[in-house]
Every structure is written in structure tokens, then in C-alpha cells.
């Protein structure tokens, strides 16, 4: 069975590892290429885009793909929409593998907002020390609020993505840990944390650290998923879907 995994997440990597080395499947992992030094994967990997819906549909036909698993980041809305439309055109079954979203716990002070622009507004007009953990591509929105001091953590260098007077940039990659996150926030005198509701355990320690320090967290809600796409929350469920649908996967 020829399987295309749209990756870039821990779940995609875990699924690739579970399918690696099997004689009854031929998996291919696709990565967007936004990280310059991606971790090596145990299955064949392609880097880069497909050229929109038409390009992806053509790729599915040319490569005789029999199933697609969209294990992209919960905020990769464009890719997910393209995958849904392309799979419909090519008549290839599609499954979305999505980690559960975080939910507020006792002691959390969440400010839930629908967009990055709303997150900027939620910071208010008075200068604050803001810990931004939203990804390099989302930083430009915060240029509209240059009065704040920003502590920005990304995997890749931010370059000139956030042109404001006061920025401290940190390059680091998950997983993170509660104690280290608390230490970082205390050392940098953080007033508020801004994050996407990405879910998962690797970056959750910032939420736990903010809770323990009594800090507010501006949480950007996930974009809507494409309609009509079946969704599961774990690698085991994705493998069960393959087995149930096609009868030949583990």
C-alpha cells in the first residue's frame, strides 16, 4: 500500500516510525521545508510544496498513492484544505491525525482569542513583557504593538520578522520542561505568555509554568478543520484506520 504522510509534527514522525521497514506498505513522508535542519526520518522523505491543490492531486495520481494521512500542525490550515480538495479530486481516502487541543485547568488564567490579530489586541496598550511562542511566521502581527518587550522563542532565526525596538530572540526546540520554563519566565520577568493552542506534551510546560507563576496566557484557537474529513487523535487510531479501510496495514 502506497501511503503519503503530510508531516512536520511529532505524530507524523511517530507514524513514520511505526510504518518503517514493513514489506506490506510503502510510506512517503512529506515535509514543508520550513525547518532548515529537520530530524532524520526512517522512511523516504520529500521536502517542499506540491503546487497547490492541482499539484497535489497530480502527485497523488502519479505516485499511485492509496491513502493520505494529514499529520500536519493543527495550524497548517492551508495545507489541510489543499489536502482535502486534492484527495477529493484524486479519489484518495484522507485521514486527519490531530493531537487533542489543550484545555484550561484549575488555576489557569487563559484569554482565548480567535486569531493572531486578536492576540495582539488582548495584550492591551500598556507596555508589557510578552513571551511569544507562536512560530516565526506569525510574528509580523505583533509589529502592530511595538510598545511591548518581546521574548521570542523559535526553532529558526527570526531575522527581521518582528521589527520592534525591544526583542530578545531564543532559538530552541521542544520538548521543554516545567522547571526550565518557570526559570526562563522569572529571569525574563515575563508578564504574559502568547501561544497557539497546538496541543501535545512537548510544549505544554509553558502552560504549566505560567499557571504556577500566576501569569495570564493568551491562547489562539485552532482554525476550523476542512469539512467531511475523518479525524483521529492518536497514531494507534491512524493505524487502525488504515487496517480497517484497506485491510493490509498494521
Image: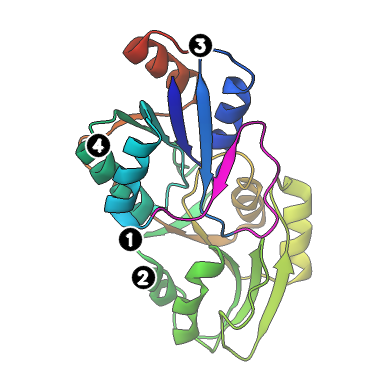
What mark, if any, has residue 114 been given in the picture? 1
Residue 240, horizontal then vertical, whole percent:
43, 14
* Residue at mark 1 to residue at mark 3: CA–CA distance: 38 Å
The residue beneath circle 4 is 90
Residue 120, horizontal then vertical, whole percent:
43, 75
- Residues rendered magenta in the picture: 35-50
What mark, if any, has residue 250 been given in the picture? 3
Quarter occupied by the N terminus: top left
Check if mark 2's residue and mark 1's residue have beta carbons within 8 Å.
yes
Residue name at image x 53 percent, y 62 percent = 134
* Residue at mark 2 to residue at mark 4: CA–CA distance: 37 Å
Check if mark 1's residue and mark 3's residue have beta carbons within 8 Å.
no
The residue beneath circle 2 is 118
What mark, if any, has residue 237 been given in the picture? none
Dot 2 or dot 3: first in sequence order is 2
Dot 3 or dot 4: first in sequence order is 4
Helix, strand or loop status at disc 3 = loop
Residue name at image x 78 percent, y 53 percent = 180
Residue 47, horizontal then vertical, whole percent:
55, 51
Dot 1 or dot 3: first in sequence order is 1
Say if the magenta span includes residue 72.
no
Amino acid at each position: 500500500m502506497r501511503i503519503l504522510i503530510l508531516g512536520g509534527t511529532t505524530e507524523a514522525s511517530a507514524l513514520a516510525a511505526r510504518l518503517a521497514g514493513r514489506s506490506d506498505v510503502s510510506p512517503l513522508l512529506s515535509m514543508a521545508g520550513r525547518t532548515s535542519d529537520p530530524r532524520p526520518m526512517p522512511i523516504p522523505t520529500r521536502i517542499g510544496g506540491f503546487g497547490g491543490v492541482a499539484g497535489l492531486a497530480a502527485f497523488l495520481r502519479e505516485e499511485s498513492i492509496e491513502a493520505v494521512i494529514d499529520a500536519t500542525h493543527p495550524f497548517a490550515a492551508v495545507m489541510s484544505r489543499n489536502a482535502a480538495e486534492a484527495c477529493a479530486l484524486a479519489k484518495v481516502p484522507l485521514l486527519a491525525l490531530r493531537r487533542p487541543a489543550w484545555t484550561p485547568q484549575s488555576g489557569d488564567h487563559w484569554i482565548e482569542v480567535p486569531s493572531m490579530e486578536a492576540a495582539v489586541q488582548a495584550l492591551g496598550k500598556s507596555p508589557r513583557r510578552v513571551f511569544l511562542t507562536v512560530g516565526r511566521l506569525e510574528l509580523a502581527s505583533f509589529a502592530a504593538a511595538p510598545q511591548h518587550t518581546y521574548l521570542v522563542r523559535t526553532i529558526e532565526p527570526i531575522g527581521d520578522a518582528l521589527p520592534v525596538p525591544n526583542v530578545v530572540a531564543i532559538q530552541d526546540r521542544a520538548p521543554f520542561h516545567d522547571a526550565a520554563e518557570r526559570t526562563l519566565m522569572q529571569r525574563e520577568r515575563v508578564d504574559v505568555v502568547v501561544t497557539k493552542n497546538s496541543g501535545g506534551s512537548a510544549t505544554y510546560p509553558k502552560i504549566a509554568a505560567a499557571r504556577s507563576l500566576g501569569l495570564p496566557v493568551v491562547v489562539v484557537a485552532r482554525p476550523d478543520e476542512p469539512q467531511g474529513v475523518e479525524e483521529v487523535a492518536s497514531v494507534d487510531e491512524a493505524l487502525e484506520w488504515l487496517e480497517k479501510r484497506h485491510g493490509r496495514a498494521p
